[in-house]
Image: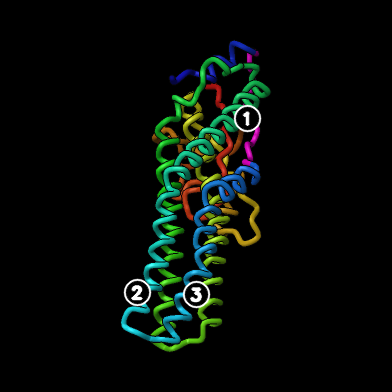
Amino acid sequence: MPFDLPAMARRARNVRRKTITIRDIIPPQMLARDLARTAYAPIVAVWEDATPRIMDAYALSLAQMTTDSPADVQREIEAAEGEASRLYLLLDARLRDWTLRVERWFRGKWRGAILSATGVDLGTLIGPEGVRASLETHLAWNADLVRDVSAQTRQRISAAVFDGLRARTPAREVAAKIREATGLARDRSTRIASDQLTKLTSSLADERRREAGIDLWKWRHSGKRHPREDHRARDGNLYADRPGGGGETVDGQRVLDPPEDRPARLPYCGCRSQSVIRFD
């Protein structure tokens, strides 16, 4: 339910300043590792476990090159795909648990940051209901990504196997390509998990800010080693969400209209928005 945090803060502390900058909330990578471990790693493990069976069928097919032997390889790949599909319900439940855990973590940090900055305790005013749409959106997004990791791994393995049969490639070389495919899936899963944590917490920050009637925020750069230069240049810039908010000056700093590529919007962007309360 929307509420007027600036007015509540003024009543709580008789604020005389023009703005209060809320403490930056940085998501811990532990949460990303938990996502990778509980939701993505099991899918990669399915394909890793299937590799010996696929390679046994490949070696036999390569030795015999009968009409039916390539079908044996196909059956092993389809069996692994079926095992992955049976996991999806379990993984969807784990994704939901993780999403709700991130929401609880962020809500606690947001409540503490607001209390420290303004003296206002939001404990009875905020709950998961206020960000339900964002949670469901990110849950569905993560579920699609889990399935995509499996689909890409299957595609790479199938290409390695059937290209190998056509070229009579030795089994050890095909096995190396399959290991490369599962390694790529594991690495991609780690990157996805980190990116999804950033995107979810960024979305929660936006929702909590709107809910509290806060329309100003600062760009906080991720500090990554290979940043987008335009994102790094925005670090500390002040932006307004309200229409026509750009162009004014607050505390001697010019307020800008937000760019389309807001923090965390682009792939693997780790930037954040830091809320700023203004008192008109």
Q: Which residues are magenta?
A: 13-27
Q: Residue furthest top?
A: 11
Q: Look at the magenta stretch and give its main secondary structure.
A: loop
Any mark on residue 55, and which?
A: 3
Q: Secondary structure at mark 3?
A: helix
Quadrant of the rendered structure where residue 278 is? top right
**Depth order, front residue of 165/179:** 165
Which amino acid lies under the numbered mark 1 shown in the image of this protein? Lys
Query: Mark 2 = which residue?
Result: 71
Q: Secondary structure at mark 2?
A: helix
Work out which quarter of the rendered image holds the N terminus and state it: top left
Any mark on residue 109, and which?
A: 1
- Crowd around label 1: few <14 · some 14–19 · many ≥20 (10 Å): some
Pointer 3 or 2: first along the chain: 3
Which amino acid lies under the numbered mark 3 shown in the image of this protein? Met
**Depth order, front residue of 222/190:** 190
Q: Secondary structure at mark 1?
A: helix
Question: Residue at horizontal 64%, vertical 27%?
Answer: 113
